[in-house]
Amino acid sequence: MDSSSYTSDSSEDFASGGHKALVRRLALFLAPILIVLVSLQGLGYLSGETLPAWLAARLQHASQTPILYLPSLSDHNFAFKLEATRLRQPDVLVVGQSRSNQWRAEMFGASFYNASQGTYSIADEIAFLRALEPYAPKVLIVPVDFYQFDPNWEAVYDRIARNDMELLDADSFLFGASLMVRPMISAPMRLLRLQTDPTDGLPAIGLAAGTSGIGFRPDGSFTYALELPANRSVGASVGDIEQRIQFGRAPFLFSSGLDASRMRQFEELVSMMADKGTKVIGVTMPFHPDVAAILGASPNHGGWAAFRSPAFRQWIDGLDMTYFDFTDLSSFGGDEREFVDAMHPSEAAYLRMLISMLDREDSKALLATDIASLREMLSNLDALHLNDGVPWFARTGPAT
């Protein structure tokens, strides 16, 4: 009996000691991995690259010093712009894609925020606006682009995150650490400091903002940092766009016409905001005139032809909104040199469009903006907003 008891106790002691040894070995094995992961995520937080978008929005909003925001390795713009809008609750709100990103607070008399580049489709815009409830702006500026009404457009951006990374979340932690592996190998010194905007030395959050000076200002508008020569020819040239049109690449997907379900979505958006007492202003931004001509000549882009038709104009004019079509530069006194690239009008073009919008009494009452101040802003813009001679993006070959 004693022998049996002795054997049992010895087995328990051995098992207990074996478990402890296994735990020690496992801890020794995992410790270096955990140290690496924590270090990578720490560098991600320091650079702002893996900082949760909601926290970045709050830091930008609370700072007395302007902070530029744009990560390089991930896109959580939906969450960033959503939190920023919640914090500001502006009277005038802009939603949409990058072709709306040059609207600036200085252009408007009321409180303003530009939430563009946070939404990519009409469905995104509806989801974004619903997530803001019970808040609703007094005025909503929405883009009206032909590709929004393409049934395949949403699939182009279906992998873009609409959620956010979190501070105390295992999945976010591992995802953030994995993002930092490549920059840690390629440019480690860039991560070992707080980021600053290279154009003015002010604080920045994210490697794109800290390296290239591009990103979102506190009012939500986007700066292309044209002060830096390296940023002056990084967009799409007419030649690039011609290739996209030829091969049906986004946003110039092949189409036979406009999708009725997407048009109903847009009607839903306008009706939803009207029910909230929000006045909706729809704006069709111009492409470079050469791009519009190439689209018009394409046999594979029936959506563009339908978008430019009298039937479309009759439909959109029948909605409870104010609509401006600035496809033709002559409609607002535009200049083909006033583009950032062949797809994106510059700030100067936006000012001209806004001045033209204020010629209408309904818009003048909604926006409460002083035309004289806009004209002064336009006259004070430097030469970076007006390319001398033939601009780089008008060349026929692809960008190099």
Image: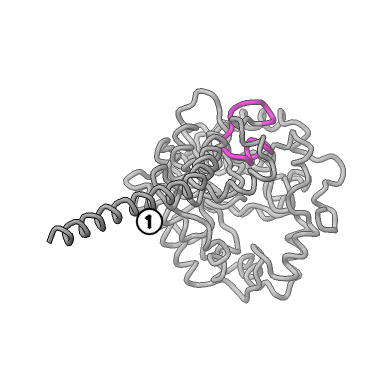
In the rendered image, the vertical position of residue 169 relative to residue 120, given as above or below: above
Q: Is residue 200 left or right of residue 382?
A: left
Q: Is residue 294 left or right of residue 202?
A: right
Q: Is residue 182 left or right of residue 173?
A: right
**Which percent across, then down, holds residue 13?**
26, 52
Instruction: Please rate how many residues cluster around mark 1, counting C-alpha atoms within 10 Å: few if below 14, some from 14 to 19, many from 20.
Output: some
> What residue appears at the point 32 percent right and 51 percent down from the top-left corner?
17
From the image, tell me which residue sits under label 1: 272
**Which percent across, then down, holds residue 355?**
62, 39
> What residue appears at the point 64 percent right and 65 percent down from the top-left corner?
308
> What residue appears at the point 47 percent right and 57 percent down from the top-left corner?
124
Label 1 secondary element: helix
Q: Is residue 351 visible?
A: no
Q: How many marks?
A: 1
**Which percent across, then down, holds residue 202?**
61, 26
Is residue 340 within the magenta segment?
A: no
Residue 270 falls in image quadrant:
bottom left
> What residue appears at the point 79 percent right and 37 percent down from the top-left corner?
229
**Which percent across, then down, holds residue 260?**
50, 72
Q: Is residue 360 visible?
A: yes
Q: Nearer the viewer, residue 49 or 253?
A: 49
Q: Which residues are magenta?
A: 198-215
- The amino acid on which the numbered mark 1 sits, given as a three-letter code, is Met
Q: Nearer the viewer, residue 232 or 302?
A: 232
Q: In the rendered view of the protein, which quadrant contains the N terminus?
A: bottom left
Q: Residue furthest left?
A: 1
Residue 191 falls in image quadrant:
top right
Residue 351 falls in image quadrant:
top right
Q: Nearer the viewer, residue 264 or 168?
A: 168
In the rendered image, the vertical position of residue 164 relative to residue 310, given as above or below: above
Q: Nearer the viewer, residue 157 or 346?
A: 157
